[in-house]
Image (cartoon, rainbow, N blue to C red):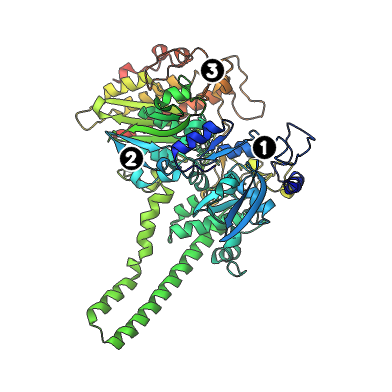
Amino acid sequence: MLPASLDEAVTALAASPAAVPVAGGTDLMGAVNAGLLRPMALIGLGRINELRGWQYQDGTAQLGAGLTHARMGRPDFAALMPALAEAARSAGPPQVRNAGTLGGNIVTADPAGDTLPVLAALEATVTLVGPEGGREVPVSHLLTGLDPMRGGELLGYVRVPLLHAPQVFLKATGRTGPSRAVASVALVLDPGRRAVRCAVGAVAPVPLRPLEAEQWVSGCIDWDGDRAIDPAAAAAFGEYVAAACVPEPQPAGLPDSQPDGMEGGPAAAAARLRRTVSVLARRALGRALK
Amino acid sequence: MTDAVTTNAVTSNAVTSPYGTDPQEPGSELSGFGGADGSPRVSYLLRVNGVDRPVNGAWIGESLLYVLRERLGLAGAKGGCDQGECGACSVQLDGQLTAACLVPAALAADSEIRTVEGLAADGSASDVQRALAESGAVQCGYCIPGMAMAVHDLLERNHQPTELQAREALCGNLCRCTGYQGALAAIEKVAQSRAEAAEAAEAAAEAAAEAADAADAAGPGEQAETADAADPDSLADDSLADDLAGEQFGRDEYPGDGYPVDEYPVYSDVEIPGQQQGEAQHIDHHHPDHHHPEPQADPLFGPMDGLNTEQPPAEQQYAYPVYAQQPQPEPYQAGFQPQAYPQAEYPLPGTQPPGAPEGAEPGVYVLPHQGTHQGTHQNTHAPEAGA
Ligand SMILES: Cc1cc2nc3c(=O)[nH]c(=O)nc-3n(C[C@H](O)[C@H](O)[C@H](O)COP(=O)(O)OP(=O)(O)OC[C@H]3O[C@@H](n4cnc5c(N)ncnc54)[C@H](O)[C@@H]3O)c2cc1C
Ligand code: FES
Ligand code: FES
């Protein structure tokens, strides 16, 4: 029930396919407590030390799926993967960050999962390990279901490029204190390819990449100089991203109040969300280019 | 086997049990082996506050909180939400503060568990517990066991927390009564008294060393060194606090980046139009006896139903975990075609989104709906002019 290695865990899962793997339990136990899930057996991943650390591999970092949010938030990790660290620092209260893991965050694939837009912007890949061995899948394919996890597979590692350039994660929540994102933006610079990569989280079932806006803005940056950008262009980038990721607020035909008495109907809500995304994207760009 | 039956009977009668009877199978008889649905039962040892406690015939899905309270009789940790939101169930698991309601108890079998019962030495409250009581942090008291664990955890890692660090350490512990000022005061008080005690201990040790030195007729150079060590400015605690500032609490220390704390963008970064101050209504039910059937007017924020949109004056913006509720934007109502892509069959690994194109580029989210709503070519905002 508490395998000590990834191989053991895969074998255990093959032996009892009804078993549910559990890492930190912060997503899983919420469902169990709410009566949504009655696992017949659990396979605890918390004792697999190889999954709890990370190492370098030719220009990339290979992150264990069992890295906790608390661990990812620490300065040594943040120095290399600042946006991922920032996402981890904002993912819930300390009690949850001490337990919740990177792997659990990806497998749960909650729309508001905070590491997901960062991984999308970094174009990370994940290693899925099954009885037949491991395979590498782009995280975007996993999240969109283009290349889903197969039965008996476990998420072993996440590979992210080491870009040695500013990376920003910003998150808007509905309240002060730790809570899930209403919208989030991850933005990374890839000076080698002269590219800006950006992903917007929480506004759709999976993180969205505004590809055209990325392309446009990387053309506006003075890559060889001090990487400065005109503030007006940064603001335009924000609008561009928001327009690409949040659907047009419907102008007419919808009631402008919600049944629960909240101010503003769906159109107002969409406009608000657009504005939020646009501000986040603008600030993220500004901070990355600071 | 009889054991399993009896424990199950207890389980199903317990008010707080999320596991008692299976809603899917009302009235189904609990059979000897396994639970109502034949789910396996296990026995294991839990090491709680240094004592090995056997747990027999427990369903594998039982949370540590449930097992502590209902099977081991340790009712210190409280159940507020069973969702990790309220922190009333906080315990330390191998030295890490964790929400016990989110830990499968069976998987904690070889961990060191520390609960609030383990804080009190010889039956007398710990310094943190006393300080909480003395600082007015306790009203109904429901949040206090979890709060005490969180404060202990904080002060073990960070002997001189700043106010921001203290607030962040408490941000997972909801208190519906007090407004957190008492708890913050308690943290300060304990930090101070522990520092004083450490200083006194150091001074005593120094005096002892000096006496020994005098007896040994040691050279003056060493004496100067000892005096240096006692200088409050060079207290090891200070540097430890600095070291840990970024480690545990994150956002005020950010290597390679110079943003000051208040510019740090995680929590209240964006001013959201229509943002509303309110309260965490979702934990109103956190004690069966304290259930408020009607939303209560809040003296500071006004009535709960007509949430007022004003920020409270600065002096009333008390501790960190005060909640501003934002009506959650629902983008999908605005013609985003949510019906076409119901979430259940969409992003979950293991399913194929309807109509997903084949062989899309790695890292490129070519979603079926992107063609329509991400059509930035028709977008009037397209800022060519900005280039
Ligand atoms: C109060 C609270 C606040 C939260 N706030 C945030 C937030 O702000 N942002 C955010 O992103 N998340 C948040 N979360 C969600 C949660 O903490 C994260 O999603 C966390 O990363 C989940 O990790 P875990 O290890 O606990 O997953 P678990 O609960 O252990 O597992 C989740 C799912 O993933 C599967 N799984 C886990 N690891 C593997 C693996 N290696 N291979 C295959 N399958 C695996 C499990 O079977 C399970 O189905 C919050 C949760 C709580 C309770
Ligand atoms: S009961 Fe565990 S956090 Fe609320
Ligand atoms: S004293 Fe904190 S909830 Fe009542």
Residue at 72 percent across and 44 percent down: it is B292
Left or right, residue B139 beside residue A143: right
How many numbered marks are there? 3
The reply to whether label 3 and label 1 mark residues of one chain is yes
Q: How far apart are marks 3 and 2 (CA)?
A: 41 Å
- Residue A215 position, x and y percent, is 32, 20
Residue under mark 2: which chain is it in?
A
Instruction: List the residue tagged with mark 1.
Output: B39
- The secondary element bearing badge 1 is classed as loop
Left or right, residue B37 beside residue B249: right
At label 1, the amino acid type is Ser
Q: Distance between the residues labelled 3 and 1?
A: 42 Å
Instruction: List the residue tagged with mark 2.
Output: A55
Residue B281 position by quadrant: top right
Vertical arrangement, residue A26 with respect to residue A160, above or below: below
Viewer can see residue B273 = no
Q: Nearer the viewer, mark 3 or mark 2?
A: 2
Instruction: List the residue tagged with mark 3.
Output: B336
- The secondary element bearing badge 2 is classed as strand
Residue under mark 3: which chain is it in?
B
Q: Distance between the residues labelled 1 and 2?
A: 39 Å
Residue at 59 percent across and 46 percent down: it is B106
Residue under mark 1: which chain is it in?
B
